[in-house]
Every structure is written in C-alpha cells, then in structure tokens.
Amino acid sequence: MIDLLDRRLLFITGKGGVGKSTVTAATAMVAADQGKKVLLVEVDAKGNLTNLFEHEPVGFDPVQVYPGVFAMQLNTEASLREYLKLNLRIPMVGRIGPIANVFDFVANAAPGVKEILTVGKVCWEVRESIEGRADWDLVIVDAAATGHVLAQLDAPRTIRELVQTGPIRGQTEWMMDILSSPSLTALNVVTAPEEMPVNETIELVARAREETTVPLGAVIVNRVLPEPFTTEDEPVFAALAGPEATAVLRAELGEGASGVLDAARLAVALRRSRVPHLDALRDAVDLPLLYLPFLFVRDHGLRVTRVVAEALGAELGL
Amino acid sequence: MSPDRGGGARTASLESLLASREVLVFCGSGGVGKTSTAAAAGLAAAVHVGGRVLVLTIDPAKRLADALGLEGIGNEERRVPDAVLRGAGVQPRGELWAAMLDTKASWDDLVLRHAPDEETARQILDNRLYDNLTSRFVQSHDYIAMERLYDLHSTGAWDLIVVDTPPTRNALDFLDAPQRMADFFGGRLLRWLTAPYRLGGRRGARLVNIASKPFYQIADRILGTQFLQDIAEFFLNFETMYQGFVTRARAVERLMKDQRTAFAVVTTLEGAPLREAQYFCSELTGRGYHLGALVLNRVLPESFADPGIAAAADRLVSEPDEVADRLVELGVGGLTDPVAVARVLRTIGTSFQDYAVVATREAELREQLAKAPEVLATVPTFADDVHDVSGLARIGECLLGAQLPSARVRADARAGEAEHRPR
C-alpha cells in the first residue's frame, strides 16, 4: 500500500513512448474516484492529454474533463500574465505581446526562467489549496519527459543561483519548501520493461537524488507482458510445441495449428526478453514499483484510461 | 541484392536511397526504435552498397553503443572493426563508422572556431550562463546536432551519413533549430536587451540610464540588476560570433533541402506515434524536404491476420478438452494429464487471440496511411531487443526487403514530390 494519493502534488515523468500521459490520466481518475478534487496540469504543449478522457483540448483555465478531474494546459504567456498581476500588481490588460516576446526570449536564453513559470504556477495552486484559497486536494502534473524534468523541478534552485536579488528570488523559497516536502510532493517515473526506458529510469532516479531535493514517489512499470504459462505448465507447452504433437494438432485443427504455436512461442519469447530489464530495474531502484499490464486493445481513449486506472488502483491497494 | 539496383530512373527502394543520397536523416517520436533503425540502415549501406558510411547517433542504448564500439569515446568518429561485422555474419563491401554526439564538446568546438579571439572564447566558455545554455537549453541540442552533421558532411570524407535525430518534444524542432539560433542572436530583442550596456561604452559596463525605460524597470523588478547584467555580458560576447552562426545556419538549411539529403520517418503502428509520423511526413514534404521512406517498426507478423490460424486458435479456446483427450490418447510427447494439456491449449489459443487484437489494429492503421512516401518499409517485432550487430543486420535485411506500397499510394507520393521540387 502506497500513500501516493495522500500527497498534494504529483509530478509524473517518463521516456517518450512508455505511456506517460495515459498513466497520468489514470492516476487522476483513481484519485477522483476516491473523492478527491484533482487539478490535472499538462505541461508539454501537445494538448492530447484530454483525449484520454474523450474531451476536447483545454486551455489555461481548468475545465472539468471527468467527474472530479479538472484539466488545464500551461502556457508561458498566460502564466506570465497571471504572475505579473498577482506578484507585481502590474495589471496587464489586452495583449502583453512585446513583454511576452522579450520574456520568451529571455526564458529561452536564461535557464530556469521558463521552467519556473511552470513549476511556480503548480506550486502556487498547491499553496493556495493548503491555505484554503483554492480547493484542490491533489495537483497532478504531466511533466516534461525524463530528459528535461529535472531542469523543470530544479528551476527554483537554478534561479536562486542566477538571480541575486528581486522578487523572484524571494518566491523561490516557498516553492522549494513545497517541492522538497515528502509529505506534499512526489516525483514519479513511468517506464516500460525495455532497455532504454529502464536505463533512463535508473539514471533519472539517481540524478534526482543527487541534483534535486524533490522526493521520489513510485516507479510505474507500464506494459508488462503476461507470463503465458506457469512453471508447472511450461513442460506441457514444450511437449505441445514439439514436432510430434504439432503433427497431431495439425491433423485435428488444420494447417493453422502451426501458426498458433508460433504465436505462442513469440508471446513467450517477448515476455522472456523483458525479464532482464525488470530485474535490472528492481536491483537498481529502491522505490515502490507498481506494475501495469500490457493491454491488448485497439486504441487509447476513456476506455483504456479506465482499465489502466483500475489496474493502478489495485496496485495502490485501493 | 534488390532487382531495382541501378535499374529504374527513380528511387524505388531503401537500397537505392542508401546508394544515391549523402545524408539520410531518421526522425520519429520517442520510443519507436529510431536509433536502432538508423544504425541498421547504416550497416545495410556498408554491407550492400559499400563506401564509407557514418552513423551519427545521439543517445544510443548502452548495449548498442557497446556493439558499435562507441563506449567511452567523446566526439570523434570510430570505425566499427571488420572483425566485429564478420563475427556477426555480415561481409561489408564498405566501411562502417559510428560517432556519438557530445553536445558540450561540440559547443566548445563551435565557440573556439567562431569567436574572434581567444580571450572572448575564454570569457564565453567561463560564463555561468554558457553551461546552462548548452546543457539545458533544449534547442541547443537540436542546433548542435545539425551543426555537427554539416561539419561532418563538409569534410567530404563520407559517402553516406546516417543521422539519428535528438529526442525533442516535437521531432521536427531540429529542422528549425539553425534558423532559430540565427534569429536568436540576430534579433532586435537581443539588441534591445543589451542596449543599456552598450551605452556604457564598452562591454560589461554598468547599466546606465534605464530609469526612463519601462521595459527595463519591469525586467529589473522581476529578474534583478545583476542577472540582467550577466545575461547582457554573455550575449555581447556571444554576438561576436553572430556572423558565423548566420552563415552556418543558412548552409545547414541548404544541405537539409539538397537533393543529396533524404529523410526517413520511423513509427510503430500505434495510434499516437503513427499520427505524429503522418504529421512529420506532410510537414517535411510541405516544407520542401525530401521524404524518402516511412519505416513501420515492430509490426506483428502477418500470420495474426490468417483466418486458418485464427480458426485453429478459436477451436483451442472453445474445445480444448476434446483436443487434449486426443493428444493424451495417442500418447504424444509423453503428455499424460488431459486437464493440464487442455489448460495449456486454451492459453495458447487466448494468447493468439490477444495478439490478434493488436495485429488487427495495426492492419487498420496501416490501411489509413493516407500519404506514404515512395518507400514503405516494415520491420517485424523481434522477440528480443536489438543490441548487437547481428540484430542490426536482421533489421537491415527487413529495411532493404521493403515492399513497394500499392501503385496508387506511390503515384500520390510522386505527384506530391513533384509539386515541391525546386523550380
């Protein structure tokens, strides 16, 4: 049993292609089904997170996409506008084009500036909720992929190092307090039992410990293939796949029998090829591992999100 | 190997693409097997076409890097020893080389090359923003990958360079990187930002006379004076390299659009990667790049669509007992327990049915491929990860054995290409 959902802020990262967004959406669904009010934040501008709830894309203002799940998409200009209004009392009516352009430019050049708007907005929602001015029980962030997530989470510290004075520096303090608190925040990594995702996960976990103060939550291993046969049944399969039995099966079932046996061999081999990667992950990472099955389904949408959410709920002991 | 070799006037197989182009760029969304596919194409070129072939890879899996002899090396090109290739059962006609992109080392090289003098170079390399810029500024990876490719190409040392592209949020960002870099350093905004420091008379002078300008007031209130000054100092130094950057950016773009360069898009037959791949294909063509091939990777075998096999699987699921009894009765393979045999037979049948669902989705997505380039290659799912040269050789064979898509799709692709041919 892992108390992941008792935190206030969950970052979910992962290498491209492992199903990060699906797992993020499923996590939000599990939490909402538990009665929590969830803010689901999409950071990458891909805008397809809400597809997983069969909902049209959303903008900067949170929209309910599933009972209890409110989704929003971060956007640099909107974040900046909000920041200026709230923190510097600079009202920005209409377009802030030139300032935003300059800002975009500085943000691209100077590390951490763009990231701090992202992390800052997220931390701000958490702080407002803790202090009773907002009512999110949980903020879940579909964070940057493994390659960039640490830069994102470490932005307050980067900014502190670079900016010696000014209001931003002061604000990095409370952000870092939230980001460093094990009772509030957790960084979670989605991976798949394949070489590259496992290596990236191991590396990310080590680097997160070394380079940041952000507490780690769980590693979610997605797309775990089922083991077709139990140890007891394996010799039976071996005998059935032998030439003698195959001949009988072909006589009984037609030519197609060989093809079915080939497919079973492929299933066994695919599963076996994943085992060393799972072992490597278990050996190298001392975090709770949650396993989600490979889904033999047609395509992703609300149906798949629900199936993943059920599996995740079971892994969380719910 | 292919009957098309040297035959038709037009590029019609991946092999002719490998033989006729000097640069082949592999792109695709993360996790689709882009790196292995690029390496396999490079190997196939060295084996079947010959010449000096270089695979420029960005972030290979460790075992693949080891297999190519890339472990522990910096930015330089290394030849994959013939013994390694022969050990894996391939007889190369040419040479296979491999190189990894070391972003930091490439940036340092670039600064040393373009800076007007050693002192400026030193100041740039020592600036604390520089480290952050080169290691964290995502677009800097894209830029440096293109820069490095250009550099390697202009040595004239390679018959073919196969390039793996960096993992980016948008796999086409790297195409814009050179132009964006040039815009960045040449932009009015940069001049605006650094202007007050120029008024001081020399680089790094104190900020003067800003009180009257609202922009600086706001920037100063947000970022602080010191930070603004650090940024300005850095960019004033960096600006000295501007002309070099712009010239290079243009040259890189020319090379990317040259007839000698082609792109290959890699995807799996899953919804999201395939949608992205189709977007890449239309973007590449629309922007005047040469889309050479679409590689469908990790595709399930066609046998999953075979009705005869499916019928056999259905029967195993619905009537395993009958078949099990028959097997035990005949005493085949020492099978004695009809209950266990029936259980395993049913599992064999369900396993097929499970994968058949995925295979059906793949077949449907494949049908929907509206606009495919001339070469459509399919690489099947292999039971094991590809992490050695013989695995790459196996992928390579699949790439070269590429079936031509239907005549209709091919004709569409040609018509599409003709529209974008430079006049």
Image (spheres, coloured by chain):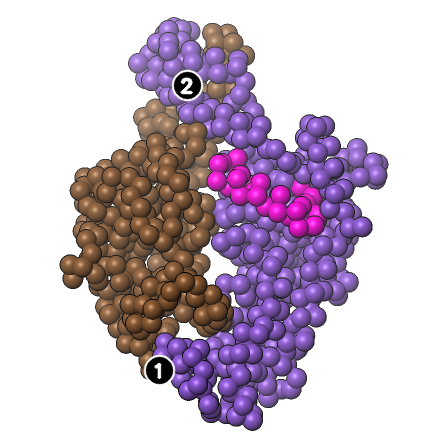
Chain colours: A brown, B purple
Give the residue type at disc 2: Gly
Question: Is residue B276 positioned above or below A156 on the image?
Answer: above
Please determine if labels 1 and 2 lie on a single subunit. Answer: no
Given residues A67 and B213, the one toward you in this image is B213
Q: Does A222 sit left or right of B7 as displayed?
A: left
Secondary structure found at label 1: loop
Image coordinates of residue B382 in percent, x first then y, are: 53, 36
- Residue A181's label in the rendered image is none
Residue under the image location 48 percent in, 69 percent down = A98
The local crowd at label 2, few if under 14, some if 14 to 19, many if 20 or more residues have their Cα within 10 Å, is many
Q: Farthest residue in the front direction?
A: A94
Q: Is residue B278 magenta?
A: yes
Residue under pointer 2: B349
Chain identity of mark 1: A
| Residue B88 makes an appearance in the image | no
Query: Which range of residues does the magenta coloring cover?
Result: B267-293
**Which numbered marker is on residue A164?**
1
What residue is at 62 percent from the left and 86 percent from the top?
B118
Q: Residue at x 72, y 59 (%)?
A: B255
Residue B205, given in percent of the width and then of the height, sits at 50, 92
Label 2, secondary structure: give it.
Answer: helix
Q: Is residue B378 visible?
A: yes
Q: In this rendering, is residue A128 above or below A230?
A: below
